[in-house]
Amino acid sequence: MIRKLLKYISYTLLGLFMLLIIVGIVWYRSDIEVKDLEPTYFTAQSSYIQVDDAKLHVRQRGSGPAIFLLHGSFASLHTWNGWENELEKSFHTISVDFPGHGLTGPTPSAKYSTDDYAQLIFSLADQLKIDTFYVAGNSMGGQVAWKMALHHPERVKKLILVDAAGYSRIDTAKKSSKQNRPFIFKLLQNDFAARFLVKITPRFLFRWNLKQVYGNPDAVREEDVNRFYDLMMRSGNREATMQRLRQPGKDLQDSIRFITTPTLILWGEEDRWIPVANAYRFKKDIPYSHLIVWQGLGHVPMEEQPQTTVASILPFLNNKPGNNSQQ
């Protein structure tokens, strides 16, 4: 009886081992060199700017007052394509691939926290000789943006938060009560899964991930899936992602109430990553703020419906009366 059981266990383990080998063969993907990605993702307005030890991929469009556009986790500056098409008519837009993302890729110092990113954008602004500016950020980029306004309000003229990160705790009185994180973050924070996905990265995971962040999953385009996948495959980005998720930065959510910068809060009501309840927390905590909530949109409304969403920020940027209601 024991022999049969051991034999069964041995065959099961062997089967699992063979399955892992097959999965590895099918889904193994080597890094893509940046020079092979540039023909597709380095645009006419792109340039590389050295800031500290980061060779930043920066895209500048239009002229006028400067506005920095900061992308979210796993994304790239291309998430702002639709907004830039409109904003460049009146503004100098500056979008950036954060270190560990897009064409920028990893850095020797491996500084990937939101605090590091905030300082990096200030340093970039200094190099571009831009003293004051507007800043808009989505998700992780939103957290970078509000930290910038918190630390240097004299430089950030107005703040736009698009489904922004920042509230890691459900109740400030219960610091051990954590908000649920999206599945992909939980998966990548598992050491075994992280090491596995650094080399074996299935494309379907990116398609599933994008469908999670859209209010309407059917609106996800194959070209968007290809972009997210290709840029994650950029040499060093997968390893940098694993490092980044282990250094999120300082928890400053209790300091959000000290932000004095005029703020526009934008949110997709169907956000599955950061619940719309957080939009109301930002509205409550930031005294000079307006809130717009869009029905049917998800975590990246500026990608899902760029024309509708960018139209909502123009009155705010142009000093016209703000919309303080939900849409």
Image (tube, rainbow, N blue to C red):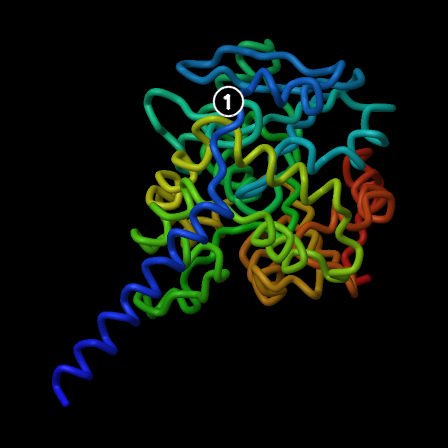
Residue 65 placed where, x, y %? Answer: 74, 21
Quick check: 183 above or below 58?
A: below
Residue 16 placed where, x, y %? Answer: 34, 64
* In the image, farthest residue toward the left: 2
**Of 101 and 9, which appears nearest the observer?**
9
Given the image, on which type of amino acid does mark 1 rest? Phe
- Identity of the residue drawn at 48% across and 56% down: 184
Label 1 sits on residue: 122
Residue 249 visible? The answer is no
- Identity of the residue drawn at 43% across and 39% down: 241
- Identity of the residue drawn at 34% across and 45% down: 195
Secondary structure beneath label 1: helix
- Identity of the residue drawn at 47% across and 23% down: 120
Left/right of residue 173 with respect to residue 327 in the rendered view: left
Residue 304 visible? The answer is yes
Q: Which quarter of the figure has residue 128? A: top right
**Of 59 and 89, which appears nearest the observer?**
59
Quick check: 257 above or below 40?
A: below
**Of 143 and 271, which appears nearest the observer?**
271
Q: Which quarter of the figure has residue 198? A: top left
